[in-house]
Image (cartoon, helix red, strand yellow):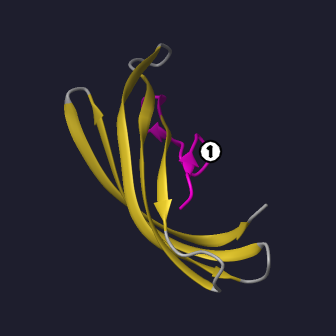
Amino acid sequence: MTLPSKVPSPAASAGALLPDAQLRVQLHLYGGGIRIGPQHRRFQPWVHVLVGGERLRFTQTAGAMATNNGFAYLAGVGADYMLGPRFFWRFSGDYLGTREFGANQENYEFGTGVGFSF
């Protein structure tokens, strides 16, 4: 059992320029939780649950920024395939939910990539 966390990073931040208006939107997620799965094997499947918050920044007009803070949660499954003692290939899928402006939003994210353990 490990205690993972997720903080703002390029993968967790989204910025978009809306057409014809110079309006900008940024979403930053942060949180922590628990990850359960066997370790010290070549193939390591796992599940995790993280709870935290999100900060949404957006322009209401071409110059003024507004912000909103909300609740965020993430639940997912994945697997790490050990490439060596410190490097691994990760496959993961997550369900991401946020609550802002009095409404729930639901999304899914899938990813893969190489990781380094230290």
Q: At which x and y percent is residue 7?
A: 58, 41
Q: Nearer the viewer, residue 3 or 13?
A: 3
Q: Is residue 10 left or right of residue 106?
A: right
Residue under the image location 26 percent in, 44 percent down: 105
Residue under the image location 56 percent in, 52 percent down: 4
Q: What range of the chain is rendered magenta? A: 1-26
In magenta stretch: residue 71: no
When the figure is inspected, residue 3 is found, relative to residue 43, above or below; the finding is: above
Q: Would you name the residue on which mark 1 appears?
A: 9
Residue under the image location 60 percent in, 75 percent down: 39
Of the 4 image quadrants, the one containing the C terminus is bottom right
Q: Amino acid at mark 1?
A: Ser
In magenta stretch: residue 11: yes
Q: Nearer the viewer, residue 106 or 73?
A: 73
Q: Nearer the viewer, residue 81 or 95?
A: 81
Residue 55, by quadrant, is top left
